[in-house]
Image (tube, coloured by chain):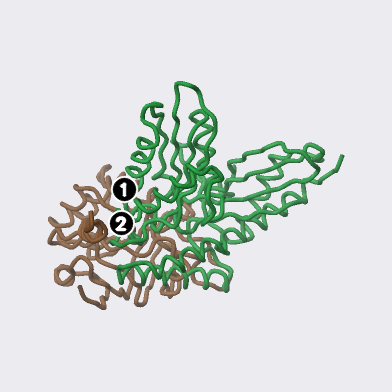
Chain colours: A brown, B green
Amino acid sequence: MGTIYLSTPLTTEKVEKLRAGDRVYISGTIITGRDAAHKRLIETIQSGSELPINLASQIIYYVGPTPARPGEVIGSAGPTTSGRMDPYTPILLEKGLKGMIGKGSRSKEVKDAIRKYKAVYFASIGGAAALAAQQIKNARVLLYPELGPEAIYEFEVEDFPVIVVNDCYGGDLYIDGIKKYHRILNADI
Amino acid sequence: MRYIETDTITNVVAKLCIEANYYLPEDVLQAIQTFKEKEISEIGRDILAQLIQNQEIARAQKVPICQDTGMAVVFVELGQDVHINGDLYQALNDGVAKGYKEGYLRKSIVADPFLRANTGSNTPAVIHIKLVPGDKLKITVAPKGGGSENMSAVKMLKPADGMEGVEDFILKTVEEAGPNPCPPIVIGVGIGGTMEKAALLAKEALLRPLGSRSPHQHIAAMEERLLEKINKLGIGPQGFGGSVTALGVNIEVFPCHIASLPVAVNINCHVSRHMSAEI
């Protein structure tokens, strides 16, 4: 498990270098999206229309930030629970999405799609939202401003800290990490 | 009879909403610090250190600790010798709207569970009013995040399931939640009463300071036993594996029907927020 500095766009070649448990610092442009934005994107795809955004080699951060104070880039911006996006994720991966940042477990369907389309799922620290915001250097609303905190933003990030949970080889930090410590903590039984 | 103006209530609630979201309670901070020394995983210790750093930034810069500034749950203890000049519920909701606007807090409430249009004001709040003796008005604002609330559960057990059945249910709920509710978590448990009473007890249990114990000996022992068992699950900080899955288990009990054993488990994240004031 290493430390990797990663710049966007996230190509397949870069994805292949990542392993579950790696600490990664992301720099470049990422987009945001949570429940309502995902629903809209999928409805657009299902209606046969062109997506208003190119997802190829993109990283999406599951976040609904707090409003910025005047003069500030963004408010607090930690990850939301990724599992709620699971029903929408495989189709976005098929459209070229390469990376996801959130927190919490993914479904089997998402993990299978991560392997199939060579993508990666990162976690950032849930609840450390003031700290995370310090690595966001620029923010603008890209799509769906009417959704308020659920709008799609474009963030410029610098050394945004994440950890690889699901890599493109089937590695899963949540399963392996919990199993390992469960064994250690119950060794005397 | 003591008269209280609705404006006073609104202003106090607004301040409580803001402060609850900017300042982590001292008992929660202390618990994170204490448990950091006990965490056996290196990455786990690193995460707990970052949680401490995060709340320092929030406090200094007056920004929310977490971007999920929650649904505002408001507990009111209303002295029966108080007369409010106006609508108390309106005053409380006005306070929530004011606090979430002026504090740059996120508005996370949708008006209808299916139509899901944001109300834009983080109202309505969930309000619990208790009538008590005296002429004071005590207000507690406990903003509740969606991620951890979603991992909560209620179950109607059989009296024959006893303590063991209750503990199994709590453990199973925490295990299934895994990394989702942002561990290390705080667990509020309500046992007894009816279905809704157990759920409310579980929410109230989250307000009790971490490290305090139930006044009932057998329940206090259960709290300690459960904390130990939960911290042996291996989930750890953020679910990456480790020995600190929970910072505390608080249990509240209430008498119940001869046929019933209701249990509610309300999970809170490490940003276990609440702030009180007395008028």
Q: CA distance from mark 1 to mark 2?
A: 8 Å
Q: Is residue B172 left or right of residue A127?
A: left
Task: Residue at 52% x, 56% y: name it.
Answer: B210
Q: Which residue is mark 2?
A: B235
A97 or A135, which is in the foreground? A135
Q: Which residue is mark 1?
A: B175
B110 or B224, which is in the foreground? B224
Q: Is residue B7 left or right of residue B183?
A: right
Q: Do tag 1 and tag 2 residues touch (Cβ < 8 Å)? A: yes
Is the residue marked by circle 1 packed among few (<14), some (14-19), or many (20+) residues within 10 Å?
some
Residue A96 in sight: no
Residue B5 in sight: yes
Question: Residue B255, relative to residue B237: is it above or below?
Answer: above
The N terminus of chain A lies in quadrant? bottom left
Judged from the image, the secondary structure of the residue bearing numbered disc 1 is helix
| Percent x, y of residue B109 | 52, 46
| Percent x, y of residue B13 | 68, 52
Task: Residue at 42% x, 55% y: name it.
Answer: B185
B4 or B235, which is in the foreground? B235
Q: Is residue A121 left or right of residue A147?
A: left
Question: Residue B152, relative to residue A13: is it above or below?
Answer: above
> Numbered disc 2: what chain?
B
